[in-house]
Image: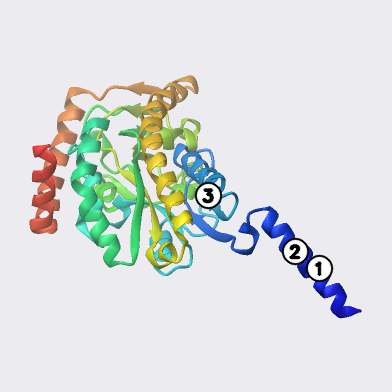
Amino acid sequence: MKRRIFTTAALGFALAGSLAGGPAFAQTRWDLASAYPATNFHSENMAQLVADVDKATGGAFKITLHSNASLFKAPEIKRAVQGAQAQMGEIIFANFQNEWQIYGADGQPFLATSFADAKKLYAAQKPMLEKKLGEQGMMLLYSVAWPPQGLYTKKPIESAADLKGIKWRAYSPATARIAELVGAQPVTVQAAEFSQALATGVVESTMTSGATGVDSKLYEHLKYYYDLQAWLPKNAVIVNKKAFDGLNKGNQEALLKAGKDAEDRGWAAAEKVNEDTLAKLKANGMQVLPPSPQLKADMAKVGDTMLKEWLEKAGPEGKTLVDAYRSK
């Protein structure tokens, strides 16, 4: 009797699988770790990628997006993907400049200050990024820039001298170095902890995008945004190479296609987000202003100093990259 029940159940399960095309037997589940809120445009772009992969594979390849540092904190994500604790993760390259200087190229102030220039820098940087990630057991699925970075403060700023002693949120080697060069006090705060740090007075200024300003509701604590358009750092979705190699061909193709679409969609979204978020900052009472000529000149000097320092650290690789970017 027990044998008959088992046989019948197994037959029913097999029929169900065949009617559904068989994916239930070979469903693949991956985790995608991100440090940003679900409402951020990068997160929304990843959510669409997840949906595209699911649709393309008929539900055979399921990716779970873990936003807002719910799986790993921002500094942990790259190592988690490298060590296969998560099959995919989203990072901001500039955070890892101390590991390899080329990761920080797009965080150099005033090197690439428009979306068009940021795309040219990415085109020059991409082969180097793919090679390095490959050596580390990972692959680059896609990369999308943030909107241009500006300066947020509690008080009006006319020149770099006005930033002396101010508590400045640093989230990368570049933002920490800017703070040092203008005499500000750098404080390391990750995206998920930013709002709390502002509310408790741990930080009182930062240099970041309009998108982060809206996400973190900076208008609740800071009054001024100076549209310096200092640089456009890139986020990237990276994949553990062994995990990718373990996918069947159909799932690999679905992921690569979804990644290409996400990159194209993300760059277009970044430009629109820049316009929309600056309008939202204004609507919530923040003064969105162009930098004074003096502030612009002071920050340009900071940029020159930092690029010189970066090229010294980056060596021949850095010079090759900058030369390739400037020749495009």
Residue 169 can be seen, yes or no: no
Rendered position, 101 above or below 148: below
Give the numbered dot on residue 224.
none
101 vs 196, left or right, is left
- Secondary structure type for disc 1: helix
Residue 70 found in image quarter: bottom right
N-term mark: 3 or 2: 2
Residue type marked 3: Ser
Residue under label 3 = 67
Residue under label 2 = 13
- Secondary structure type for disc 3: loop
Rendered position, 164 above or below 74: above
Give the numbered dot on residue 9.
1
277 vs 120, left or right, is right
Image quarter of the N terminus: bottom right
Cα distance in 3D space between marks 3 and 2: 35 Å
Percent x, y of residue 294: 17, 26
Image quarter of the C terminus: top left
Q: Nearer the viewer, residue 253 or 237?
A: 253
Percent x, y of residue 171: 35, 50
Cα distance in 3D space between marks 1 and 2: 6 Å
Image depth: mark 3 or mark 2 in front: 2
Instruction: Give yes or no for contact between labels 1 and 2 (Cβ–Cβ under 8 Å).
Output: yes
Residue type marked 2: Phe
